[in-house]
Image (cartoon, grey):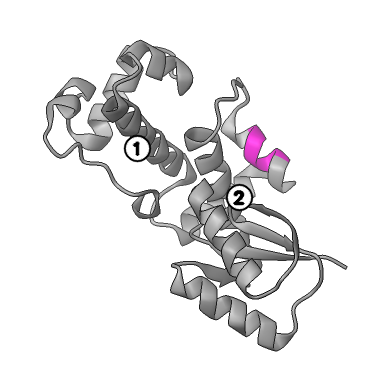
Amino acid sequence: MSSIIHIKNMVCPRCISTVSQILSDLNLDFKAIKLGEVELISKLNESQREALARKLQGSGFNIINDRKSQLIEQMKNLVVEKIHHSNEETDEKWADVISGELKLDYKYLSSLFSSVESVTFEQYIINQKIERIKELIVYDELTLSEIAFQLHYSSVAYLSNQFKKVTGMTPTQFKKSVDKNLKSLDDV
């Protein structure tokens, strides 16, 4: 009799840790936590749900109740997980990843995403990749060729062109810039 709760704004392992602590503080037992989702051992009563919603909101999270918003959040979390938190190498296309994970037609999901968000799903993926590239440039541990390979770009030139198109500067110009223009994942 487990229960799945979908949570908006979980973007990193620290978010998982925070949500885990909130659940512990409320004495709510769970089976699993991943980006955007908690599997509770049992269903919540109304007062537990309200208490959880309040505590989550206090930490910048929100419970997602409607199905369409849950799907969009799941799509975002899959992208963030694969781009920012996984070193898994795959040649699988995003359409196959998303439709395979969510068990729905990619055209429907992509259309849903675009109708609710201010960007297309493809542009969202590009924006996440650009933010990851910025992080990796700031860390200064990988060459641009290694970054291109890690993020599945066909060439450094393609990465550089896409980077400039989105940010207005080349990766080299970005590296030289003072403030590095990093955004938090929540703002992407």
Viewer-closest of 158 and 89 = 89
Give the farthest residue toward the bottom. 47
Report how far apart the C-alphas of labels 1 and 2 lie in the structure.
23 Å
Q: Tell me the SS state at disc 2.
A: helix
Judge left or right: residue 14 versus residue 4: left
Give the farthest residue toward the right. 1
Q: At which x and y percent is residue 87?
A: 55, 25
Which residues, given as a range, are shown in magenta?
Answer: 96-100
- Secondary structure predominantly adopted by residues drawn in magenta: helix
Q: Can residue 32 be seen in this view?
A: yes
Task: Please rate how many residues cluster around mark 1, counting C-alpha atoms within 10 Å: few if below 14, some from 14 to 19, many from 20.
Answer: many
- For the point 34% across and 27% down, the residue is 136
Name the residue carrying label 2. Answer: 109
- For the point 57% across and 77% down, the residue is 53
Q: At which x and y percent is residue 119?
A: 40, 50
Name the residue carrying label 1. Answer: 131
- For the point 74% across and 78% down, the residue is 44
Residue 78: mark: none
Q: At which x and y percent is residue 124?
A: 43, 44
- For the point 55% across and 35% down, the residue is 82
- Look at the image and tell me in which quarter the N terminus lies: bottom right
Up the image or down, 11 lies above or below 79; here it is below
Viewer-closest of 45 and 21 = 21
